[in-house]
Image: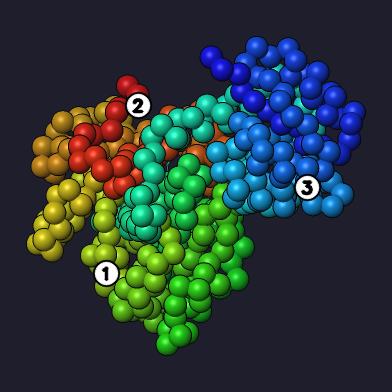
Amino acid sequence: MEKIKVMIVDDSYETRNNIRQLLSFSRDIKVTAEAASGEEAIMLAGELSPDVVLMDINMPGIDGIKATEEISLSVPDTIVIIMSVQGETEYVRMAMAAGARDYLCKPFGGDELCETITKAYENEKKRREKITPLSAKGEMKSRVITVFSTKGGVGKTTIACNLAVSLARSSKRRVALVDLDLQFGDVAIMLNVSVKNTISDLVKEFAQMDASLIDEYMVTHFSGLKVLPAPVKPEYAEYITANHVERIINELRETYNYIIIDTSANFHEPVLTSMDLSDKILLVSTLDLPTIKNVKAGLDVMDTLNYSPEKIHLVLNKASEQFGIKYKDFESTLHKQIWSYVPEDSQTVVTSANKGFPFVMTRTETKVAKAIIDMGYELMKEMDGGSSKKSPLRKLFG
Ligand SMILES: Nc1ncnc2c1ncn2[C@@H]1O[C@H](COP(=O)(O)OP(=O)(O)OP(=O)(O)O)[C@@H](O)[C@H]1O
Ligand SMILES: [Mg+2]
């Protein structure tokens, strides 16, 4: 295997030396450059295209965050890993938003250092293998994916948020998440983004609405994802019409590659509009009779709406056969194959929702995270990879 080429960026000679020492024990990693400032880092990264850049945050002149941003734009195949000291959480967030893939807290040991580099490198390799580039003309392709269910509490928001974050991280394209659960939307809480404006403030400016105005109303999550939050009060929901939603989605299509929409559990006009305009609908179910009954009714409605079966992907959340219903029976009741199985993992899912850290970023080793990350790759492949194969996703467990 070829060694991973690493560049160390730190204004302290001693720190650079320490890191070089730590990496000298690794068989898979090779230090190919060192830079003592942000300026030097940007220049050398452009010249040498290292696989990984270890970037200090605090440096005189161009700091680590600005340098990360520059490198992510000019040498997109280079992975930046940020090095921070304890307590710089805000800087770490900014660095991640600027394109850093991971971070290390100083002081770190050799094992942790090598592991972080190798993991980031492997993930990048995997990503590159799975994605086919946008069309040669470079024209913008935009895809709308609505996450829906006819039943509440089945995991729509969990899946929408984590899928969106995962796409934002792995596709390197622009991803927007719109909270169309207009009365009780909780996307902003689940992702722990601070809400200044919401969709209800945006529709007040309907007359002047264009892509750049909408952008001003969107909040940036530290993964790079842009979020349009739901109204802060349930009673504001009624002011948002199907027309508004249509206009918002169409404007977003101008500037975003993927638009993920979280919904409420009903066929209200705004939700219907979003489904009409969607390339894919992820219909979420769990394996209990009331939900199955509702989801079946939902599928019947979509059938009368003339949605093609390929447009709808059946996602089984909290998937397990241990409560007495078999996957096969579920599929034959709904006359539809399960497209993705998301296992139950309350420890991971609930903790991550409470902390506001999406588990597709913080708990990538869990099966539940893998299921959703894979869902993202599969959607990218299906919609942009030119492959028309619609095989169900690999079962990840059991
Ligand atoms: N795979 C899972 N394993 C364990 N718990 C889960 C899983 N998916 C979702 N949950 C939990 O189930 C609850 C409902 O999830 P979520 O809020 O995502 O559902 P929803 O369909 O958006 O609900 P609502 O209809 O109220 O908007 C949450 O407490 C969430 O943490
Ligand atoms: Mg929800």
Q: Secondary structure at mark 2?
A: loop
14 with respect to 309 (left or right): right
Q: Is residue 335 visible?
A: yes
Spatial CA span between label 1 and label 2: 33 Å
- Counting other residues with Cα less than 10 Å from the Cα at mark 2, is it few (<14), some (14-19), or many (20 or more)? some
Mark 1 crowd level (few <14, some 14–19, many ≥20, 10 Å Cα): some
Q: Which residue is mark 2?
A: 396
Pointer 1 with pointer 3, Cβ within 8 A: no
The residue at which mark 1 appears reads as 273
Residue 41, quarter of picture: top right
Nearest the eye: 185 or 337: 337
| Residue found at x 89% / y 31% | 13
Q: CA distance from mark 1 to mark 3?
A: 48 Å
Q: Amino acid at mark 3?
A: Glu
Q: Is residue 295 visible?
A: no
Is 159 on the left or on the right of 149, as rendered? right
Q: How much space separates mark 2 and mark 3, taking CA atoms?
A: 45 Å
Residue at image position (35%, 75%) is: 247
Please state if 93 lies on the left or on the right of 276 as rendered: right
Q: Nearer the viewer, mark 2 or mark 3?
A: 3
